[in-house]
Image (cartoon, rainbow, N blue to C red):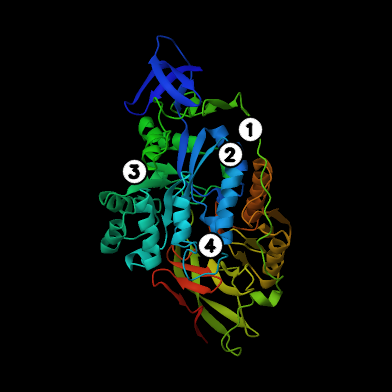
Amino acid sequence: MIIRGNILNVFTDEIYPGEIKIEQGIIQSIKEVDQYFTDIIVPGFIDAHAHIESSMLTPSRYAEIALKHGTTGVVCDPHEIANVLGMEGVEYMINDAKYAPLKFFFTAPSCVPATQFETNGASLDSFDVESLLKRDDFVALSEVMDYIGVINDDEELIKKIDVAKKYNKPIDGHAPLLTGEELQKYVMHGISTEHECSSKAEALEKKRLGMKIMIREGSESHMLEEMINTPSDFIVTDDLKSDDLIQGHLNIRLRKAVDLGMDPFDAIKMVTINPAEHYNLNCGSISPGKSADLVFIDNLDDFKVNRVIVNGNTIFKKQKILYRANPLPLETTLHVDFKKTEDFDVKAQNPNHKSAVVNVINVVPNTIITKKGNAKLTVDKGTIIPSVFEDVLKISVIERYGGNTISNAFISGFGIKNGAIASSVTHDSHNIIVVGTNSEYMAEATNKIIKNKGGLVAISNKEELELALPIAGLMSDKPVNEVAKTSTQLNEIVERMGCPLESPFSTLSFMALPVVPELKITDKGLFDVNENKFIDLITHEE
């Protein structure tokens, strides 16, 4: 098989007309020719860090849409479903991905559970991690989120890191705002990447220590503009919702990077040869012996994808995808009772008091970081009342794994005037999370999640909508168009409810992640990430 076009060489930053000889899916040779072509052939795009579950699609469904955008490989961390189902969940992802032409390069989850400060559905120990890293389809140890555990030499966590070293596989990092001596100790253990940088200064400090920097441009975190002139190695999505994925994948991130002034050759390397070399993948360049994963684009400005080839086979051409998914089923993973309105009430310590000062989670728009604040709220008949006028709403986490516990707190930044939104996608333990203006709406939204065996819900005094996610409470087996349409409609409803956030459900999903500063809520209570401890919801009453 011979493929002809203008070949982009990631080693020499050249584009020249040539022909590529392919046999059994492998590039055999490249020859320069004297001929005019319109298309530029580039290596297939590789997302160096992604969680497929965040798209709300199964791997096979994810492939249907990502391939259209020129993505031929994804380094994916299945720790979302691992927190729900452990090894069974990881195997589900592998098996569902098995027959998709998109190449899924899995990483072994390092922190399941992410911390001891929340309840999840399963755990993976160092023996589980070793059983995965032995396999060829596992290319790295997933992001080590428990950086406190690394710094304090947690025995089990260090064993997992040592297993990765044993099999000579990279160790991915996750250490937001970590600096100084603690950062140096973290890096000393061989942790090699970072996707959590929120400033140039943070990225530069980590780059100077030898870490490879991932610029994250996902549904919630948009760091390309901030990081464009910072020495970096990869452009990644991390968490990308289906309604964003349907618009584009790495192709539109390349376009944005070039629009912001990045050299197009440098940008392409960040999604081709750089991840391929770091994770030891047999792709990422148009060179002999590499997999024939090729993308045909118009130019290096808009990166419009015209044709996609994987292993020498055309998968996308003339705006048609030549692959159809057949997702695997999965039994329900929600084991939780329906909730009553009073379950969401926050009681004053003294029912005779008239007001209470409470700690408040303050949302920082377009990031997963929060700030710690406080508010003075009214006490009515012993119950602390949220203040819609001041945008201090209630937030609750409902444990879904059989314990039936619930924790309540207050949050600012969602701006909802009347109603509630709820989700069973809640990083990383994926308990049910709900934000609302009163307990009635919160109970109703939560019960719809339980009825649907997982999903997203928005409900107000004017309208309501739900998206069922029956695959581990994280994913739908429906095509991306259906999932994206409902997801978009949900966001539109939430906007009409008064929410100013660009991706309200994505933001909500991170409000229970107790490894990202500053203040979060888990099913066990309100957690101060900086202090690494639970704190009281009520500071004092009057």
- Find the distance from the CA under tag 1 to the CA under tag 4: 42 Å
Q: Which mark is residue 323?
A: 1
Q: Nearer the viewer, mark 4 or mark 3?
A: 3
Instruction: Tell me the residue at 69%/61% (across/down).
Output: 449
Q: Secondary structure at mark 1?
A: loop
Please say if the residues under marks 2 and 3 sit with CB atoms less than 8 Å apart. no
Query: What amino acid is labelled 2 in the image?
Result: Ala
Which residue is tagged 4? Answer: 413
- Find the distance from the CA under tag 2 to the CA under tag 4: 34 Å
Instruction: Tell me the residue at 33%/26% (across/down).
Output: 13
Looking at the image, is mark 2 or mark 4 earlier in the sequence? Answer: 2
* Percent x, y of residue 444: 72, 66
Looking at the image, is mark 1 or mark 4 earlier in the sequence? Answer: 1
Looking at the image, is mark 4 or mark 3 earlier in the sequence? Answer: 3
Query: What amino acid is labelled 1 in the image?
Result: Tyr
Q: Which mark is residue 63?
A: 2
Count of labels shown?
4
Which residue is tagged 3? Answer: 232
Q: Which mark is residue 33?
A: none
* Percent x, y of residue 73: 49, 38
- Find the distance from the CA under tag 1 to the CA under tag 2: 9 Å
Please say if the residues under marks 2 and 4 sit with CB atoms less than 8 Å apart. no
Instruction: Tell me the residue at 62%/68% (across/down).
Output: 401
User: Would residue 510 be found to the left or right of residue 162 on screen?
Assistant: right
Please say if the residues under marks 3 and 1 sit with CB atoms less than 8 Å apart. no
At label 3, counting other C-alpha atoms closer than 10 Å, the crowd grade (few under 14, some 14-19, many 20 or more) is many
Q: Nearer the viewer, mark 1 or mark 4?
A: 1
* Percent x, y of residue 79: 51, 56
At label 1, counting other C-alpha atoms closer than 10 Å, the crowd grade (few under 14, some 14-19, many 20 or more) is some
